[in-house]
Every structure is written in structure tokens, then in C-alpha cells.
Amino acid sequence: EAQVTQNPRYLITVTGKKLTVTCSQNMNHEYMSWYRQDPGLGLRQIYYSMNVEVTDKGDVPEGYKVSRKEKRNFPLILESPSPNQTSLYFCASSLFSGSRSHNEQFFGPGTRLTVL
Amino acid sequence: DAKTTQPTSMDCAEGRAANLPCNHSTISGNEYVYWYRQIHSQGPQYIIHGLKNNETNEMASLIITEDRKSSTLILPHATLRDTAVYYCIVMVGTYKYIFGTGTRLKVLA
């Protein structure tokens, strides 16, 4: 089954304790992206990647790191989490057409992170 | 950056057409308009996209004005399962997505 998986689905942690949220897709998609969703603010893009070793900042990259060493995986790293990073996080992937003619994104189920 | 503006919420009677508007007055000539929806806190689901022509698929129709400054998503026969938050999105520059806050559609029995 074609899907985007995220782990963990739920995480409660404390300020300053490094964590990684994993994202994996099995559709051979070039493009992958991370979003956070907060009440009243909708979804905001954190980072995206157009292919292996190619990443770029979205709208709210501060406090986050990403890496794209393999095509299928795009982990989100919080080196020193803070309470303002408490949020619902989504990973997504899509084909990278180059022409932007069809870039349907497939989203993962979400990771609910609480930083105390 | 191109941004979208949508009404915060709308109601629609079951079986009737739901028309969801979106303003994107700063959209550039080669930027596509995408629509997604999100049911509860699940991952958003793609609905439809377009550039300048009207589009239709099995889920919905997308009407884009001639000046491309606004568009309307039409769900022709809304059901209770269409209750969701609907996002109108444009891609900005090199594959950066601006989602906005969306329209909360409630389909009433």
C-alpha cells in the first residue's frame, strides 16, 4: 500500500532533550516536506526537500533540522526542543515534476508532540 | 509571497452543492492553485488543482476566474462525510507551499 509513515505518532518530552521524528514513504517520491499545524494558524511548512541531499527552508524553519540521505526517508530533528514547538506535525511527499503541473502531496498520519 | 484568503467557516445542507471561495490576488502567472481537505486531525487529502482552466474530477470542480485572482471549489452533492477543513493553496517559488487557515465546512443533515 502506498503510504507515508511517521514515528512516533505521539511524543511527550521535556525542554532541551533532542528528538527525531521519522518520516518514510514507499512511493519513490522525490519531494518531501514537513509541516506543523497549530490552532488558528493552519499548516505551515517547516522544511522541504526536492531530492536526496537537496533541502530548503519553508516558512518556519527556526529550531528544526532535516536531512535527506535516502530518497524514502526525511527525518525532522529538534536539537533542543522548546514548549513553543508543541504542535501537530505532518510529513508529506510527492512526485517532483519540475513543471509544477501536478504535485499532489500525500500526507502522513501526523505526530502530536508536546514539549514540557 | 502569494497568499490565499478563505472564509473561516461555511454550512451546507446535505445533498446540496457546496461552493467554497478563495482569493489569491497576488498569484503569479505560472503558480497553480491546489485544494486539499483535512478531516479532524488527519493528514490533509488532495482534492484538485488548476492553473487557469476550470477543472473537474470525481471529487469536485474547480472554477478559476479569468484574472486568476480567485477560485471556487464546488462539491456538487455534499454529504456528511464532506465535513472538513478545506485549504486553498498556491505554490510559491521553488515548491514552497502556503496553506493558510482554511474554511471549516459543516454539512448539515
Image: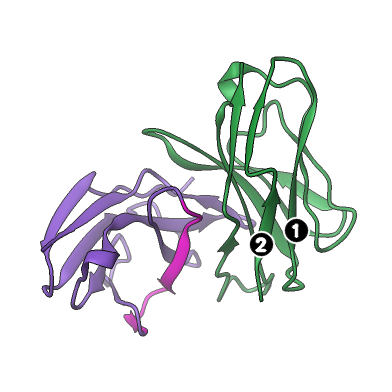
Chain colours: A green, B purple
The residue carrying mark 1 is A24
Q: Amino acid at mark 1?
A: Ser
Position in image of residue B107 (x %, y %) = 17, 60
Q: Residue at x 31, y 77 (%)?
A: B60
Q: Residue at x 23, y 72 (%)?
A: B74
Q: Residue at x 41, y 35 (%)?
A: A41
Q: Is residue B86 left or right of residue A46?
A: left
Q: Could you say which quadrant of the image residue A116 lies in?
A: top right
Instruction: Report the quarter where the C terminus of chain B lies.
Output: bottom left
| Residue sitting nearer the eye, A69 or B53 | A69
Quick check: do tags 1 and 2 share a chain? Answer: yes
Position in image of residue B73 (x %, y %) = 27, 68
Q: Is residue A89 above or below residue A70?
A: above
The residue carrying mark 2 is A4
> Element type at marker 2?
strand
Q: Is residue A69 above or below residue A78?
A: below
Position in image of residue B88 (x %, y %) = 37, 57
Tell me the subunit letter for badge 2: A
Sequence-earlier tag: 1 or 2: 2
Q: Could you say which quadrant of the image residue A4 lies in?
A: bottom right
Position in image of residue A58 (x %, y %) = 63, 42
Image mark for residue A43: none
Q: Amino acid at mark 2?
A: Val
* Tag 1 and tag 2, C-beta contact below 8 Å: yes
Number of numbered markers: 2
Q: Is residue B106 above or below residue A106?
A: above
Q: Is residue A12 above or below residue A44?
A: above
* Residue range highlighted in magenta: B42-57
| Residue sitting nearer the eye, B76 or B29 | B76
